[in-house]
Amino acid sequence: MKKILLTLIGAVSLMTVSVQGKEIIPENYLMERLIMEMEVTPTYISADGENKLKAIQVDSRVMKKLATNENPFYVYDGDGKEQLVRRGDYFVAPTRLSSIFVIEKDKFESQFRDESVPEKSIKTKVEAVEAEILKPEDVDSGTMDIKETER
């Protein structure tokens, strides 16, 4: 009876940790890790010309700087709101780099342009993760002559 009870408690606690155990990266950690790169990125301007901001796209290099390999992952933005971030989305900040926010890839690319080349739209591809790529040399062809197997 004790074994069943302990197994049940262990299973329930394991499920709650896996369901509720998400890590949320705070804004100050984002700023600490990304501020230097955001300073040298191009300035982007909104389609209506009202807003200017600095932006950096979330890719494997940025995720490595943040010490995460989860996709998606969560952050607290400049307003203290929990935001979902996927590979390809953008971290954006005002030009004075006072806070950091998240904008989805499609929304950013449709609403913002590089200030130095405003007539050119931004189109990027989300990079494939190395683990998701199946290499031909890693796959056994599975084709053998029947005569070879009979030996």
Image: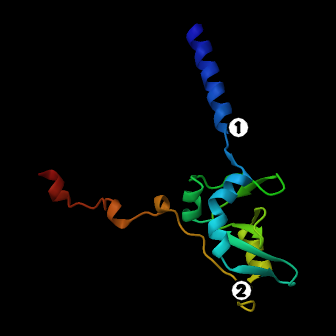
Q: Eyeballing the image, is 64 above or below 127?
A: above
Q: Residue at x 73, y 54 (%)?
A: 27
Q: Name the residue under label 1.
A: 20
Relative to 132, 56 lies left or right? right
Residue 18 to residue 94: above or below: above
Residue 36 locus on image (x, y percent): 63, 67
Q: How is the image coloured?
A: rainbow
Quadrant for residue 83, please give it.
Answer: bottom right
Residue drawn where x is 63% and y is 77% of the image:
124
- The image shows a total of numbered marks equal to 2
Q: Which amino acid does label 2 sit on?
A: Ser
Instruction: Characterize the local packing of mark 1: few (<14), some (14-19) or many (20 or more) Cα atoms within 10 angstroms.
Output: few
Depth check: give the residue in front, 17 or 62: 62
The residue singled out by tag 2 in the image is 121
Looking at the picture, tell me which residue is in the foreground, 47 or 37: 37
> Residue 92: horizontal and vertical position, in percent?
74, 68
Q: What label sits on residue 53 in the rendered view?
A: none
Q: Do the residues labelled 2 and 1 touch (CB within 8 Å)?
A: no
In the image, residue 2 sits, relative to residue 113, either above or below, namely: above
Q: Where is residue 13 in the image (x, y as percent from the top left)?
A: 65, 26
Looking at the picture, how far across and down is residue 110, in whole percent? Answer: 77, 79
Of all residues, the one furthest to the top in this rendering is 1
Dividing the picture into quadrants, the one containing residue 87 is: bottom right
Instruction: Say what secondary structure mark 2 lies in.
Output: loop
- What residue appears at the point 65 percent right and 32 percent down from the top-left corner? 15
Q: In the rendered view, would you say 7 is above or below 19?
A: above
